[in-house]
Image (spheres, rainbow, N blue to C red):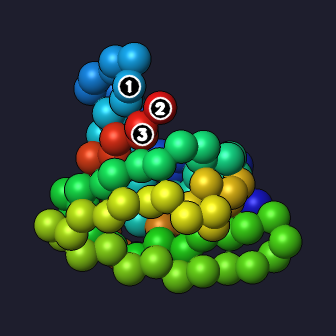
Amino acid sequence: MLAADSAAPVVKEVFKSDKAVGVLWSLEAGGESPSVARPGARAAYIIQGGKLERHYPDGKTVPVTLKTGDTLYLDKPEDQAPYAIKNVGKTAVKIYLVTIK
């Protein structure tokens, strides 16, 4: 659940076409994002890594450690299901994320 004073992610759209949308996504340490479904496959480049947690509606929590410079392809059902994200690390996490339509 989001605290009223938590920092929400900053999302800046950098391109959009009929086939994909690219955004710069960042979440400060201690920040949280609301639970939303993430339909479609996504490719991610980790600009600045850190430690996140995914919180699923059924109460399941999954730790996610991202390393700077890594790339990910997110197309599994658990990647597209609704979940909230919390930055449990000590630094901001920054990602270049492309959602394929």
> Picture coordinates of residue 101 (x, y %)?
47, 32
Give residue 101's mark: 2
Report the Cα–Cα distance between label 1 and label 2: 5 Å
User: Can you see residue 5?
Assistant: no
Of the numbered discs 1 and 2, the one sitting upstream in the chain is 1
Relative to 48, 55 lies left or right: right
Q: The residue tagged with tag 2: helix, strand or loop? A: loop
Q: The residue tagged with tag 3: helix, strand or loop? A: strand
Question: Which residue type carries mark 3?
Answer: Thr
Question: Which residue type carries mark 2?
Answer: Lys
Report the Cα–Cα distance between label 1 and label 3: 9 Å
Q: Say which of 20 and 1 sits in front.
A: 20
User: Can you see residue 41?
Assistant: yes
Q: Say which of 58 and 88 sits in front.
A: 58
Give residue 99's mark: 3
Of the numbered discs 1 and 3, the one sitting upstream in the chain is 1
Q: Residue furthest right?
A: 58
Q: Quadrant of residue 57?
A: bottom right
Rendered position, 88 above or below 19: below
